[in-house]
Image (spheres, coloured by chain):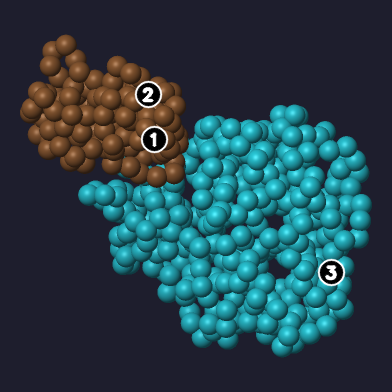
């Protein structure tokens, strides 16, 4: 039995094609995935991301636990509402998950984790809590629905669709969120996303999800499925957990060194393992030059420095070409020409530094 | 889902149409294009190639996935729809107009063994 978000029936009413996404019954598209992709780059689209899990960490000195639990440094979060992207590492440095943590108050942090890893993450956090700070409380917010509204016109359309939301969210800078209207964070707006466009991620009580979805649709926000979400994040050069990184690889070979704080004296889970193992590989971008297919995960890449593998690949609607993220030997540099095995052919591709496209514009040609 | 009564079908989601000159035109069904999503790449067999029944002979790739296309019946490839190479999306627009290749059947009776529209509708769960 597949799990359902509070918007399941609404998706069907909107003509979604539903698929099994890691045990969740989710919309992959509502017609054309490419049209949905372009709507987000040029106007506004919305995604049901209620399968992701918001988890509230509450109690005195909650920051101390996160300082130890997360690879990025929560001390970067000084102003209430500020968000931070971080990996959650195992002791051996493998990536348990990637997440966003919002600082709301010193006794209230909200963490948003991936759907497929949520139960594992919660068990891990509970273990750290019992070892280090048993007074802290961890509360999975299964009562909340999450809708990501993304695109250059996304914020204006949210304000148009949800009366009163502008007052609370007009002043939000990128990568900041705010609880609106109540202290328990039942309604929450953040200027974050997974598309490389401006926009909001809105959390509301599950009972209000359909009303909010329909209000957004009524002002012209296009319903978008997980298909477009994947091509948008790939163009934006953002990793997908379980595909571009997982427990078997370190963030340093996953293009995520920028999120790992190895400079401060602070200790954190996985730090010793990362320091002991200099990265021999890197995650980089590929742009397919030859005709002959589409780049896909698990295709082998031949380089002058040895073999590598594609971790995510697809067709970029913005570039009109196939693009990929690939884990390649450390010696490979942007501009290098490599060869990807696609079926019975070896196709030339150029190594590029992601992102491929953001804010409505192609960044690679 | 559109399943024209005038065509024959294969369980691997190709459609077949008998032409007056004895050749058979082959494409992918409306059900197949919808399941694949937006198509972005098509690879066609070489004209003159001899195909066995159920042999993988073409590739269609959507944004989501790559999929083999099989020869539902044996025969020689006598024509391919070159225009598809530049406009794979025409398969999404009309899967029955956007044919892939045309065969001269090795066995003229093979077409009759394929599914009719009612049987194909049953196969895809629409009957």
- Which-is-in-front pick, marks 3 and 1? 1
Q: Single out the residue that lies furthest toward the top.
A: B20
Left or right: residue A163 versus residue A343 is right
Left or right: residue B73 versus residue B115 is left
Q: Earlier in the sequence, mark 2 or mark 1?
A: 2
Q: Residue at x 65, y 76 (%)?
A: A123
In the picture shown, does residue B74 fall above or below A197? Answer: above
Camera-side residue: A216 or A42?
A216
Gap between marks 2 and 3, in whole Å?
A: 57 Å
- Which-is-in-front pick, marks 2 and 3? 2
Q: Position of residue A269 (x, y in %)?
A: 63, 82
Q: Single out the residue that lies furthest toward the left.
A: B106
Q: Are marks 2 and 1 on the same chain?
A: yes
Left or right: residue A127 versus residue B75 is right
Camera-side residue: A210 or A352?
A210
Q: Chain ID for label 1?
A: B
Q: Single out the residue that lies furthest toward the bottom.
A: A131
Q: Which mark is residue A210?
A: none
Counting other residues with Cα less than 10 Å from the Cα at mark 1, is it few (<14), some (14-19), or many (20 or more)?
A: few
What residue did someone put label 3 on?
A108
Q: Residue at x 83, y 72 (%)?
A: A58
Q: Chain ID for label 3?
A: A
Which chain did the renderer colour brown?
B
Mark yes or no: residue A60 visible.
yes
What residue did someone put label 1 on?
B124
Which chain did the renderer colour cyan?
A
Gap between marks 3 and 1, in whole Å?
A: 51 Å
What residue did someone put label 2 on?
B3
Q: Are marks 3 and 1 on the same chain?
A: no
The C terminus of chain B lies in quadrant: top left
């Amino acid at each position: 039995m597949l799990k359902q978000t509070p918007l399941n029936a609404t998706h069907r009413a909107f003509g979604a094609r539903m698929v099994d996404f890691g045990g969740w019954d989710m919309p992959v598209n509502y017609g054309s995935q490419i049209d949905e992709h372009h709507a987000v780059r040029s106007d506004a689209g919305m995604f049901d991301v209620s399968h992701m899990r918001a988890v509230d960490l509450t109690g005195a000195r909650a920051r101390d636990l996160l300082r130890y639990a997360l690879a990025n440094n929560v001390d970067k979060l000084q102003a209430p509402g500020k968000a931070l992207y971080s990996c959650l590492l195992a002791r051996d440095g493998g990536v348990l998950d990637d997440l966003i943590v919002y600082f709301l108050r010193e006794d209230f942090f909200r963490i948003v984790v991936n759907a497929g890893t949520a139960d594992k993450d919660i068990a891990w956090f509970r273990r750290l809590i019992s070892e280090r700070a048993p007074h802290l409380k961890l509360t999975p917010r299964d009562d909340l629905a999450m809708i990501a509204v993304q695109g250059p016109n996304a914020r204006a359309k949210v304000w148009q669709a949800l009366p009163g939301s502008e007052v609370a969210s007009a002043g939000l800078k990128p990568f900041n969120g705010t609880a609106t209207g109540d202290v328990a964070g039942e309604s929450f707006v953040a200027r974050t996303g997974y598309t490389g466009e401006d926009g909001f991620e809105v959390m509301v009580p599950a009972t209000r999800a359909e009303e909010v979805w329909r209000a957004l649709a009524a002002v012209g926000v296009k319903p978008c499925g997980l298909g477009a979400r994947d091509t948008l994040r790939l163009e934006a050069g953002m990793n997908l957990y379980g595909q571009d990184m997982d427990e078997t690889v370190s963030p340093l070979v996953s293009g995520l060194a920028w999120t790992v704080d190895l400079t401060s004296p602070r200790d954190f889970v996985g730090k010793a393992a990362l320091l002991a193992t200099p990265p021999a590989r890197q995650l980089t971008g590929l742009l397919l030059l030859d005709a002959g297919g589409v780049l896909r995960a698990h295709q082998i890449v031949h380089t002058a420095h040895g073999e590598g593998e594609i971790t995510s690949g697809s067709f970029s609607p913005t570039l009109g070409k196939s693009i990929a993220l690939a884990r390649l030997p450390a010696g490979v540099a942007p501009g290098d020409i490599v060869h990807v095995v696609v079926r019975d052919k070896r196709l030339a591709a150029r190594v590029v530094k992601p992102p491929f496209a953001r804010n409505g514009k192609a960044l690679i040609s | 889902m559109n399943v024209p009564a005038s065509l024959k079908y294969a369980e691997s989601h190709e459609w077949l149409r008998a032409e007056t000159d004895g050749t058979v035109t082959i494409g992918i069904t409306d059900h197949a294009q919808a399941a694949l999503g937006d198509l972005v790449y098509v690879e066609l067999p070489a004209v003159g190639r001899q195909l066995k029944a159920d042999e993988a002979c073409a590739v269609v790739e959507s944004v989501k996935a790559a999929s083999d296309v099989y020869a539902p019946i044996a025969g020689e490839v006598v024509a391919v729809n070159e225009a598809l190479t530049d406009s794979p999306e025409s398969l999404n627009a009309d899967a029955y107009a956007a044919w892939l290749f045309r065969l001269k059947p090795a066995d003229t009776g093979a077409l009759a063994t394929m599914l009719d529209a009612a049987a194909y509708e049953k196969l895809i769960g629409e009957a």
